[in-house]
Image (cartoon, coloured by chain):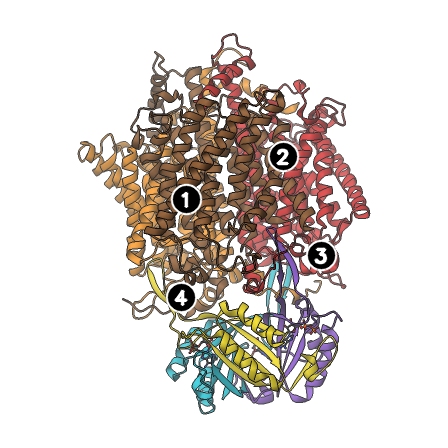
Chain colours: A red, B orange, C brown, D cyan, E yellow, F purple
Amino acid sequence: MRRNLFVLSLVVMVVAFSSTAFAAEVTAESNAVAINTIWVLLAAFLVFFMQAGFAMVEAGFTRAKNAGNIIMKNLMDFSVGSLIYWAVGFAFMFGTGNQFIGLEGFFLSGGFEHLGLDIPISAFWIFQAVFAATAATIVSGAMAERTKYSGYLAYSIVITGFIYPVVGHWIWGGGWLEGMGMIDFAGSTVVHSVGGWAALAGAIVLGPRIGKYNEDGSINAMPGHNLLMAALGVFILWFGWFGFNPGSSLAGIDLSIAEIAVTTNLAAAAGATLAMIVSWIKYGNADVSMTLNGALAGLVGITAGTADVSNVGAVIIGALAGMIVIYAVELIDQLHVDDPVGAIAVHGICGAFGTLAVGFLAVEGGLLYGGGFDLLVVQAIGVISVAVWTYTTAYILFEVIDAVIGLRVSPEEEKTGLDLTEHDSISYPDFVSPHWKTVEVNKKE
Amino acid sequence: MRRNLFVLSLVVMVVAFSSTAFAAEVTAESNAVAINTIWVLLAAFLVFFMQAGFAMVEAGFTRAKNAGNIIMKNLMDFSVGSLIYWAVGFAFMFGTGNQFIGLEGFFLSGGFEHLGLDIPISAFWIFQAVFAATAATIVSGAMAERTKYSGYLAYSIVITGFIYPVVGHWIWGGGWLEGMGMIDFAGSTVVHSVGGWAALAGAIVLGPRIGKYNEDGSINAMPGHNLLMAALGVFILWFGWFGFNPGSSLAGIDLSIAEIAVTTNLAAAAGATLAMIVSWIKYGNADVSMTLNGALAGLVGITAGTADVSNVGAVIIGALAGMIVIYAVELIDQLHVDDPVGAIAVHGICGAFGTLAVGFLAVEGGLLYGGGFDLLVVQAIGVISVAVWTYTTAYILFEVIDAVIGLRVSPEEEKTGLDLTEHDSISYPDFVSPHWKTVEVNKKE
Amino acid sequence: MRRNLFVLSLVVMVVAFSSTAFAAEVTAESNAVAINTIWVLLAAFLVFFMQAGFAMVEAGFTRAKNAGNIIMKNLMDFSVGSLIYWAVGFAFMFGTGNQFIGLEGFFLSGGFEHLGLDIPISAFWIFQAVFAATAATIVSGAMAERTKYSGYLAYSIVITGFIYPVVGHWIWGGGWLEGMGMIDFAGSTVVHSVGGWAALAGAIVLGPRIGKYNEDGSINAMPGHNLLMAALGVFILWFGWFGFNPGSSLAGIDLSIAEIAVTTNLAAAAGATLAMIVSWIKYGNADVSMTLNGALAGLVGITAGTADVSNVGAVIIGALAGMIVIYAVELIDQLHVDDPVGAIAVHGICGAFGTLAVGFLAVEGGLLYGGGFDLLVVQAIGVISVAVWTYTTAYILFEVIDAVIGLRVSPEEEKTGLDLTEHDSISYPDFVSPHWKTVEVNKKE
Amino acid sequence: MKKVECIVRPEKLEELIQGFEELGINGLNITQITGYGEQKGATKIYRGVKYEVKLKEKLKIEIVISDDKVEELIDTIVKTARTGEVGDGKIFIYDIEEAIKIRTGETGQDAV
Amino acid sequence: MKKVECIVRPEKLEELIQGFEELGINGLNITQITGYGEQKGATKIYRGVKYEVKLKEKLKIEIVISDDKVEELIDTIVKTARTGEVGDGKIFIYDIEEAIKIRTGETGQDAV
Amino acid sequence: MKKVECIVRPEKLEELIQGFEELGINGLNITQITGYGEQKGATKIYRGVKYEVKLKEKLKIEIVISDDKVEELIDTIVKTARTGEVGDGKIFIYDIEEAIKIRTGETGQDAV
Ligand SMILES: Nc1ncnc2c1ncn2[C@@H]1O[C@H](COP(=O)(O)OP(=O)(O)O)[C@@H](O)[C@H]1O
Ligand SMILES: Nc1ncnc2c1ncn2[C@@H]1O[C@H](COP(=O)(O)OP(=O)(O)O)[C@@H](O)[C@H]1O
Ligand SMILES: Nc1ncnc2c1ncn2[C@@H]1O[C@H](COP(=O)(O)OP(=O)(O)O)[C@@H](O)[C@H]1O
């Protein structure tokens, strides 16, 4: 059996890798490496699946006439993003370089020994690649229903290839914020805030959807077309977050992964619960879409401190994030920044909040645990500098795209829907006009 | 790199944990603990994902006007449930106490050494928490389309915080049924029957949906609004069950997990196949919704005996469960107990059946393997006492809720649909009336 | 605690298994076996979940009136398929026998020592069973919207029980192609091409759907009813492929799994990206359904060489597959072979392409790496012989079914839709005619 | 011959059909419509924004019937569809010049 | 001017449109409706409960046309939509007082 | 009493309703329809096959109104719904014999 031979030969490889003398021998060390490798890979797969979650949430929260466009944006965030992150993004983020950016290791060409990883660099790369795609895909929701597809693609390439990797380098890749001791375990700031602030820049440069705000300043609701799909998306995201946070230990032999899974779950639960309660009080009824956002807010909020706060701390962070998200969604709307899915509130604001909360609630170093202000200050510096960097670069990027390629579709295209105008496609032909199909007759060309 | 340091420091922790003398040393023992931990965590994640499966099955099998309400119930079963199970449920179930209930360890505050776990208590907790939420969520389907949301929330808190943990204590937490030697490996009785009998009590106290039964006793069909989503839900549940059953070994180094995965799969396959065949014979056509229920029936049925029966035994249990579920669904309907998704039949009746089947088919101790009646009697005692406990407490609970908060919405609300009346929401606005959105004008407040 | 005892007793088992002298002792060897076992099981679970992906893609790409039928076909491919593969398929594939077919080990009755597996045979079986079901389920898409359900079931039994296992034996089970050194790591040929060529035979024997081709030879479009579900399906498939390819190492201690995950991902990303670009150039717009197919084409293409090509090789294979699939879909349509979901193009043609590409791009033995023509010739022999075997047997099978049971529904049934005529069911009753439900009155029988 | 067109609440459909059958009417068409009139729209909230849904879902039922039966049909509709709350709907009567049954080619009264 | 309204089986739409084009009619409206008449409803089973679906899906096609062309239009519809089975549908003819083309403001015969 | 039936582009609905309210008309029905006329169908591509979608989505708005108000209603519709591009739609006027308000039993002008 070919595959079996393969296994044998790889056992040899493992052994070589763990510098043990005896061929075909497995050791505690080689096993530990294997445990860490499969843990990181499985976590990466779960995080990959979050792409499906984002696609369903975004499509569900927007109108049927743009569902195909949402799919295409999310699919390409990940596809083009994977290729770009392989080509340059990963090197900018984790290559040796300076405090600001990495400069070596394009196309995974090596030179990553300084990371001191025990797992194969490929395992580390795929884990990081799915994170990069997450940051990119967050933006698509805030820009939904009016963005030109080619312009969006251009943006997606730059955030995954440059804007995100730079922040990643600062905090995870040996850059200046990591040097200061900033804690962002799984990326409340690195991933979510970057996505959120880029989303903010995008939504501002684009302007609101036609019909969203009235001349007198009042706001129109534009309900999404399928709350059940949006809910499925939230469940998928929650599921994927169990890869996102516990996987960020990069080690399956690190038993704190269990504690991380618990804080992740408690924060999400508290976020959903509090969002439900607050919406009930504010609106008179338990609101579906806000409660869904509340779960995500709790998840985004805990991501920075998941390994450093207690269970009670996690519940506090989740609960506050679940409350904040409602006020944030409303505030952003009142500022006439049109974010159809709440990406800025969920990822930007709750990401920033969660990162700051570590300064208060980290069991070691947090203000409330007697750790003083040091950590809090570092966290604040991190949050602010990432916000400034991301918002500025993204804003410039969107303006350049607008000037060169065009960022927004025409009003007619927007009214007709991007599925038809950008992709010649109808996502639900049977429902929209069930019988038009019977009159197509296509003569042979 | 911060994370790498983290890993190193945790290797130290692992080592400390496994009481080895030498820092940064991994041993076969510490690796075994790590293997068990990642196995239990990954299984817990899969079981978590079953929440999405339940939501899709229940929404798909009910009408579009209640889809948002289904989402909210399932999301809160898990969210509020996680918090309650953390606060008290887990302590009642696994804390030291008496034969009937645990009494220590609220808020995971410790005192679980008597469990003799090698994995971190957090890993064990999250695995148990997703199980508790499963039991709770089963009920939501049977009570769909007519239950008051606040009343449902109250119920959900009590089942996860008290009714379920007590049963869990009896059978898994050192209680009297465990002492008698009852076999319920992954919870046909502990989880599924508890959900099923509570569902029965709920459906009875609520009464049927308006229009379900006619004055002459005849029955109306009320088809669910989206069979494709229901099917997706069943696939997700089946997928999650591979965490549910094999994960219940609590050990990845326990190679019987492979055999458990196989019996789980064969039973589900046999359940779906036999339900299809029986529906074909009975109704003249292979019935979609019954076949979907058949797969679930097979899964519920095998859950008790998955580690103790042979492959042939698993096929027998699955096949019988797939047949039973059809007759059970019809019977319950003829008794005018209105269960829109078949939860009582699938989880209650097939759960009880599966638990009893272990008494016949357990390779060690089963009647058909010459083990005599001992095991069968114990299983029967377990099934009956859990049914009595759950049905009684749930019935009282629902009656109290009905008196205090109200359990059922008004007939007008029910006709309009719970999405609009309980949540001011429309799940599919485009499909229901695609153009109403253009006439909302919302003046600034 | 019962379960804990269980764990302990199993540690003993593990120890026995790894022939160590000391009870309750875990060793590096026993841990390695455990790591491999959980890896293979988790990979199998991911591959299982691909069934949901196939169901969603196929349902989404076809019309609403056949969605329930798609579900039933996919569910039974897996359910009946699991039982048949347990009964005979696995023995034909991996039992000891001759160069052509295995002949021992029906019902997993033993005799698989020659496989030299370290993991339990159950773990290997379930991994192989989900693969077998994948091959079967591919065909359902190409035959959608017109196949008689009972005829389809008959086909499904034979492919899983015989046609597929024979090919599997040739290439993975010790048969003649394995002897020649053919490389098909995870089954571009064994699984996907088998599905694709059987799909081709099925679509030809069935003939096109009514209204698909006009008398003058021109082609009508028949858009699927839900592109969002199709996209969800593609994400699920991509997610599952991380079990499909890396899992095929059968070993978690084999660190090449990380590299395999990376090549898998890069090929899929390149496939989606190139399909998007080509569709844009050809049709003037980035096409949704072709881009979705492109991702799958990349995945199918890389499956053979995933462990043997470099990252650059993976990108090349994926990119070419993403381009090929568009031309292949069009070509098949122009030949008036009606394949509603593109199964023949994606699985058959890209599977063959990917297998041949190994002959060029395998780092060891590939033509482009100076390995000469030997490997390429072997790959070509493999591709051709599998195509001939599968197409011939499947063609005969479909003709026999057509003669005996009937393979196609009547034109009236086809026009009405298979949900109503084959299953008495409506998948979306609310959307099709929201108010008909209120007029059903069903008198007691 | 007349066409009697009535706009009614969707939840009244079943009762109406029963009433029609008692009258011996056995043919009709139903169209889903949305409409507004004196009935106030419902206020809903989506992501913090209150909005009024002006249009309400109604059903339009069309029945073609001979002149002499119009009176009793109107009575039945009014009796059955009335709740007394705003939004009960309207009945409109049109004249029809001709009716043809496609299957048989019959015209006029025989067609319906 | 007349409005010719026909209720037909959905699967006949394509053929009908071809027929209309041959007649030189190039404007119409289609509404999805459900209806019942002499045609028996189908019996379906859902979770063990048999039920009758009374209402059948039909299409309502409306064409506004000058008086002199009504005859040949009716002929075409009857010829094309007839299967001979119960459920083929009906044609109803209404009088129209006025027609206006919104784009140009043209009225009467010029409007359609 | 007349029924004014207009076929318009869906995106014009909001503006039309505002116009109607200014006219003091506060009741109408909307039906989703598909139709075709002089407007050319859009060409789309599905999996490599080009096809024409002949039917366009339109809305049919029906308003029953007293004879004297018809003129100004038509003016409003034409003014509001016109874009000047092919596909703006039509207005058809019918005579109505009787209207009844189900809630109160009022007839004629009082009913609408
Ligand atoms: N002038 C009108 N023309 C056409 N349809 C109307 C008109 N007025 C009302 N309708 C229809 O009748 C329905 C009920 O009317 P409404 O005024 O709300 O209640 P009521 O009939 O009880 O006074 C509306 O939703 C609309 O569909
Ligand atoms: N009196 C009627 N008024 C309006 N529509 C009718 C009437 N009778 C029948 N129809 C419509 O015509 C369709 C076909 O009528 P039916 O009696 O079933 O068949 P047939 O026209 O072949 O006798 C029905 O489904 C319904 O939509
Ligand atoms: N003869 C007709 N009878 C009924 N409806 C028509 C007729 N002609 C056009 N329509 C409707 O009016 C709509 C617009 O007509 P069209 O000829 O495309 O544009 P325009 O009115 O600007 O000339 C069509 O989509 C159709 O719904």
Which residue type carries mark 3? Arg
Expressed as whole percent of the image width and height from the top left, the position of residue C272 reads 62, 41
- Whether residue B343 is visible here, answered yes or no, is no
Residue at x 38%, y 44% (from the top left corner): C396
Q: Are the numbered discs 1 and 3 placed on the same chain, yes or no?
A: no
Does C258 sit above or below residue C56? Answer: above
Q: Which residue is mark 4?
A: B210
Quarter of the rendered structure image containing ligand 2:
bottom left
* Local SS, label 3: loop
* Subunit under mark 3: A
Expressed as whole percent of the image width and height from the top left, the position of residue A428 reads 56, 57
Residue at x 57%, y 71% (from the top left corner): E17
Mark 1 or mark 2, which is nearer to you?
1
Which residue type carries mark 2? Phe
Picture disc at residue A131: 2
Q: Which residue is mark 1?
A: C395
